[in-house]
Amino acid sequence: MSTRKTLSPGTRRSVRRFRRALVALALGVVGTTTVELAVAVPSNAAASTLGAAAAQSGRYFGTAIAAGRLGDSAYTTIAGREFTMVTPENEMKIDATEPQQGQFNFSAGDQVYNWAVQHGMQVRGHTLAWHNQQPGWMQSLSGSALRQAMINHINGVMAHYKGKLAYWDVVNEAFADDGSGGRRDSNLQRTGNDWIEVAFRTARAADPNVKLCYNDYNIENWNAAKTQGVYNMVRDFKSRGVPIDCVGFQSHFNSGDPYNSNFRTTLQNFAALGVDVAITELDVQGASPTTYANLTNDCLAVSRCVGITVWGVRDSDSWRSGDTPLLFDGNGNKKAAYTAVLNALNGGSSSPPPSGGGQIKGVASGRCLDVPNASTTDGTQVQLWDCNGNSNQQWAYTSASELQVYGNKCLDAAGTGNGVKVQIYSCHGGDNQKWRVNSDGTIVGVQSGLCLDAAGQGTGNGTQIQLYSCWGGSNQKWSVSS
């Protein structure tokens, strides 16, 4: 977590250089000088945890959490410190949430969800429709009865978690491993080839706001037939308006299925279809620091790669514990792979605008971040407005990572979800008032990992400012002018 501290010598030098540049420009030209938000990061400004380091570029860094391990203080201490996204390992799967047909049980799923929320984390739902871990009653069904049971299950589970989750893995592992690039032969597939589309359409109707994802393994290598099969499905869905928002790449790498350097190409090509991409279940046999760094950099290189989740906290928690594949050993010590990931994440960060402050201008709109009617009332939502140089458009960055206006009011996130308003509020040092400014022009909430966003991609006067998942749009890009 960020704490209030005096400016470091490196930061003071950056501020002095910035001010000297402004004086020099003022002597040579007439008019407003515009500078990008990003300048080089002093080495001592690097974030010290995975979640905080990922948030610098608007991403999350997550882990899988098992309800049965939440009583282990060593486990929860690491997880609570390092991660900003949680995926329940088994607690939201079909057999856990609907053990008897029509009788739902969310106790274990809620236990993981509540722990995550109490620690300021987002949650990824996993998973709604899958050939595996089906309860016995579902395994005995087929045809239209199974299809209806799938629909009922999606509706029942999503109704319980509506408005609470960031992502849902709607369909999991539906493609075959036989080199054909075709669908897996499962009881769900045998209900008809449209079952995946039906699952996504059902999910969208059940919760219009959560991001809906397809999730699979062995689709990281761009040249693999399975990868191409999933790619063709996503391309078809996007062309026909089937509601798919994201694709998850499980990324379980071992000697039989090694990391391939074309993974970045895969991420880029899927993202070009108009979906977010994420590394969702990462583990690497032997935890090669080089491989972990390469994977992290692959995600950082793709603007729509929203984050990385490792499948477990310590090696002893892994489903492949014998492979020692995670970032912490069985005793909870950081491994070399941890340092490699942290360094990669910090390498993509940038320092905030100088403490002297100035106007924050939307790249898409050319309008300024503005407090309506120069209000000083706590809870006033900020907006876009024609830049005028008045005090209600002057933002100063503090050593505590706050953006202050009027000297005592902070840019404040009213929550941590998509669409939450960004307002002014008396500065109190909370993480919802701390912001990271990135080299790509985004401004990201430290607590939420979400981007400062002009609502509805609006560009006009009065467009409200909110938090929203970072997706690379120009309505989430900002520059500062002094």
Image: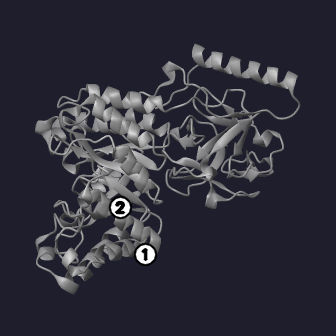
Q: Is residue 165 visible?
A: no
In the foreground, 196 or 388: 196
User: Which mark identifies residue 449?
Assistant: none
Instruction: Tell me the mark number nearer the camera, choosing from 2 and 1.
Output: 2
Residue pictured at 35% horizontal, 68% vertical: 158
In the rendered image, the residue lying farthest to the right is: 30
In the foreground, 205 or 423: 205
Residue ID for mark 1:
205
In the foreground, 148 or 282: 282
Residue 313 percent coordinates (x, y): 25, 39
Q: Is residue 42 shown above or below 71?
A: above
Left or right relative to 122: residue 437: right
Residue pictured at 42% horizontal, 45% vertical: 120
Q: Residues within 10 Å of mark 1 (few under 14, many from 20)?
A: few
Residue pictured at 61% horizontal, 34% vertical: 402
Q: CA distance from mark 2 to mark 1?
A: 24 Å
Instruction: Report the quarter where the C terminus lies.
Output: top right
Q: Earlier in the sequence, mark 2 or mark 1?
A: 1
Q: Is residue 293 shown above or below 167?
A: above
In the rendered image, the residue lying farthest to the bottom is: 144
Q: Residues within 10 Å of mark 2 (few under 14, many from 20)?
A: many
In the foreground, 333 or 275: 275
Left or right relative to 337: residue 368: right
Task: Give the quarter of the image for residue 237.
Answer: bottom left
In the rendered image, the residue lying farthest to the top is: 9
Q: Is residue 128 visible?
A: yes
Q: Secondary structure at mark 1?
A: helix
Residue 105 percent coordinates (x, y): 23, 67
User: Which mark identifies residue 231?
Assistant: 2
Residue 333 percent coordinates (x, y): 24, 26
Tag 1: residue type?
Answer: Ala
Tag 2: residue type?
Answer: Tyr
